[in-house]
């Protein structure tokens, strides 16, 4: 991907590493860490734009709060979780299946026996009790939301930023990254959008410190999309790159037509040209398109990733995989995906998660991934990073002093979750 993130030379499926230190905060009540309540809410992220497949005017997300009996600095530790944009709220699955299993589990089952701290990996197994194999989709999203909240709570209880807690648990790299390459995802189709407004949007991302950007294709004619591409390329400074994203819109003939036209440009990548599970079409495209292909944000389990690696003809030395841990059962599943990919010649530096938010940024830093998507000024308040985390030369530094995901450092998001659950 030609970004400076160091390539992994060591990946495993899962490790037996412990979640954290053998003690919690001094203020903790005696006994193992316990969940005292889990609350669920829905929040709108309605926006007046669209991609090639859906509009976002009625889009919602699930937000949950996992309350615990741990007290730090006079306040109960609460872990927060939410799903990435593009998948609607998971209220039914959460309230009818996933969370009742978590609530019914004995406290000692959910903790690491050596540390007394909640273990999100064990909790995932509890949440998946009595679920048949296959049929991932929204179920994977629901579990991923809870996984995020549990990791937030664990990291806060042990006084560590999330990326450090994840690194300590999985040990996929020698040390977590101090900064992560990010690109600005935008360029949606607006009802009143013009080429001028698109160029103004891209300029605003460059002004924020981004070097690489992404726009949508497939929601207009090929001629119109090429005009948009050329209009953006014309304003990008030297060293900046443009990716395009069709959101799985095309059949194979259309995808090939676009591939032929896009070959004239030096693009960062051509993303999700076909349905994400149409591996044969991806294999044909990989034979015909010389540039990078990117896909994976709509694959939700290690089995789907294994099939992609086996059958999609993608090129481990150049193509990009975008699985999103918050949509795919969480961090442990993502670690298994990396192990599966490693066995087939892929490196973690080829992975760049979809989602554009704090949780996936932490996963990218902890697991040595190649980068992370970013949504500046869209999908707020869920998109983007800590308020005081400037983008510098296309990279974002991790907020080392904030325990947990860092929601408390993003004022608009912190205000929303407090209002939802007060």
Image (cartoon, grey):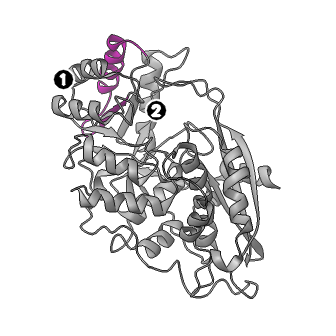
In the picture shown, does residue 116 fall above or below 196? below
Read off the magenta span: 220-245
* Residue located beneath label 1 in the image: 264
Q: Quadrant of the C terminus?
A: bottom right
Please name the residue shown 72% across and 87% down the image: 31
Estimate the x, y position of residue 266 in percent, counting from the top left. Answer: 21, 31
Does residue 136 appear anywhere in the picture? yes
User: Which secondary structure lies at badge 1?
Assistant: loop
Please name the residue shown 56% across and 71% down the image: 122
User: Which secondary structure lies at badge 2?
Assistant: loop
239 part of magenta stretch? yes
Estimate the x, y position of residue 347 in percent, counting from the top left. Answer: 26, 57
Task: Give me the C-alpha separation between circle 1 and circle 2.
Answer: 22 Å
Is 1 or 151 nearer to us in this picture? 151
User: Looking at the rendering, which quadrant does residue 102 occupy?
Assistant: bottom right
* Residue located beneath label 2 in the image: 186
Does residue 415 appear anywhere in the picture? no
199 part of magenta stretch? no
User: Looking at the rendering, which quadrant does residue 381 occupy?
Assistant: top right
């Amino acid at each position: 991907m030609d970004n400076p993130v160091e390539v992994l030379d060591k990946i495993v499926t899962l490790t037996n590493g412990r979640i954290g230190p053998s003690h919690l905060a001094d203020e903790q009540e005696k006994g193992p860490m316990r969940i005292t309540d889990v609350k669920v809410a829905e929040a709108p992220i309605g926006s007046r734009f669209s991609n090639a497949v859906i509009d976002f005017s009625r889009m919602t997300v699930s937000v949950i709060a996992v309350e615990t009996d741990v007290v730090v600095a006079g306040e109960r530790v609460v872990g927060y979780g939410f799903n990435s944009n593009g998948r609607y709220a998971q209220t039914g699955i959460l309230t009818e299946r996933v969370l009742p299993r978590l609530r019914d589990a004995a406290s000692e089952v959910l903790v690491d026996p050596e540390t007394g701290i909640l273990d999100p990996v064990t909790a995932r197994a509890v949440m998946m009790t009595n679920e048949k194999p296959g049929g991932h989709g929204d179920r994977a999203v629901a579990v991923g939301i809870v996984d995020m909240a549990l990791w937030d709570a664990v990291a806060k209880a042990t006084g560590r930023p999330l990326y450090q807690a994840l690194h300590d648990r999985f040990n996929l790299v020698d040390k977590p990254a101090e900064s992560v390459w990010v690109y600005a995802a935008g360029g949606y189709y607006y009802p009143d959008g013009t080429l001028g407004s698109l160029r103004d949007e891209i300029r605003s991302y460059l002004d924020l410190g981004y070097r690489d950007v992404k726009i949508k294709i497939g929601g207009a004619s090929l001629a119109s999309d090429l005009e948009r591409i050329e209009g953006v390329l014309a304003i990008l400074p030297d060293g900046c790159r443009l990716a395009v994203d069709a959101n799985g819109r095309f059949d194979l003939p259309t995808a090939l037509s676009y591939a032929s036209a896009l070959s004239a440009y030096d693009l960062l990548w051509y993303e999700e040209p076909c349905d994400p599970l149409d591996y044969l079409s991806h294999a044909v495209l990989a034979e015909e398109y010389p540039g990078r292909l990117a896909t994976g944000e709509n694959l939700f389990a290690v089995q789907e990733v294994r099939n992609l690696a086996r059958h999609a003809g993608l090129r481990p030395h150049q193509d990009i995989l975008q699985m999103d841990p918050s949509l795919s059962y969480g961090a442990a599943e993502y670690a298994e995906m990396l192990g599966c990919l490693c066995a087939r010649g892929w490196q973690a530096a080829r992975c760049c998660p979809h989602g554009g938010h704090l949780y996936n940024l932490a996963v990218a830093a902890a697991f040595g991934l190649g980068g992370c998507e970013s949504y500046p000024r869209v999908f707020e308040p869920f998109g983007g990073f800590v308020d005081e985390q400037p983008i510098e030369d296309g990279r974002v530094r991790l907020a080392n002093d904030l325990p947990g995901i860092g929601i408390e450092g993003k004022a608009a998001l912190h205000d929303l979750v407090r209002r939802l659950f007060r």
